[in-house]
Image (cartoon, helix red, strand yellow):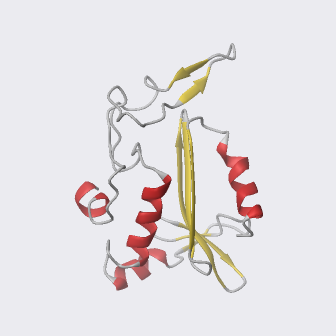
């Protein structure tokens, strides 16, 4: 991941860091205890992530990722097109209408409304999307498992995405 994605896309603030040695500007992830108090997620996720999840990133780095992917700097043009082509119909309800290779695709009006990736673990959540018709990216990161999801939809509405 580091040599094939992070370095070519110049994702200088992203990586796989040990949860007990996070870079200084990293937000800790939090889980609500049954009594309403909060604790970090240190003992609920692997100490260091792997290619299937657990990477740390920033919203600006995700913009760099989408620009590098769309600009064929991560894959050649043919492979990028194959990755972003719908291969499986996921259902009629946005945003998950189709799936490509590693990305969700929301089709609308005969075109592609957005490509997106998302993930979550106890104490963290992320969705990052590229809207090709508008040439825009929207990324939201949360340091709890649930708080950012409703806000993401509201921001899409406000921005008319």
| Residue furthest top in the image | 35
Asked if 109 appears above or below 125 in the picture, the reply is below
Asked if 80 appears above or below 59 in the picture, the reply is below
Provide residue 143's location: percent of width, then percent of height. 55, 36
Question: Is residue 29 left or right of 48 when viewed as pictured?
Answer: right
The image quarter containing residue 125 is top right
Provide residue 49's location: percent of width, then percent of height. 35, 40
The image quarter containing residue 80 is bottom left
- Residue drawn at the location 42% of the way across and 49% of the way down: 57
- Residue drawn at the location 43% of the way across and 72% of the way down: 67
**Which quarter of the image is occupied by the N terminus?**
bottom left
Provide residue 138's location: percent of width, then percent of height. 59, 61
The image quarter containing residue 142 is top right
Image mark count: 0
**Which quarter of the image is occupied by the C terminus?**
bottom right
- Residue drawn at the location 43% of the way across and 82% of the way down: 81
| Residue furthest front in the image | 25
Provide residue 31's location: percent of width, then percent of height. 58, 26
């Amino acid at each position: 991941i580091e040599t094939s994605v992070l370095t070519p896309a110049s994702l200088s603030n992203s990586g796989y860091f040990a949860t007990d040695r996070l870079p200084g500007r990293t937000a800790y992830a939090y889980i609500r205890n049954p009594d309403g108090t909060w604790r970090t997620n240190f003992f609920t996720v692997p100490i260091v992530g792997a290619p299937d999840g657990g990477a740390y990133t920033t919203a600006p780095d995700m913009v760099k990722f989408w620009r590098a992917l769309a600009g064929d700097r991560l894959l050649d043009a043919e492979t990028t097109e194959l990755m972003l082509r719908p291969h499986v119909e996921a259902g009629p309800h946005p945003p998950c209408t189709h799936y490509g290779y590693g990305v969700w695709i929301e089709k609308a009006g005969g075109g592609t409304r957005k490509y997106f990736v998302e993930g979550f673990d106890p104490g963290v959540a992320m969705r990052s999307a590229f809207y090709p018709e508008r040439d825009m990216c929207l990324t939201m990161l949360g340091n709890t498992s649930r708080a950012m999801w409703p806000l993401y939809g509201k921001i899409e509405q406000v921005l008319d995405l």
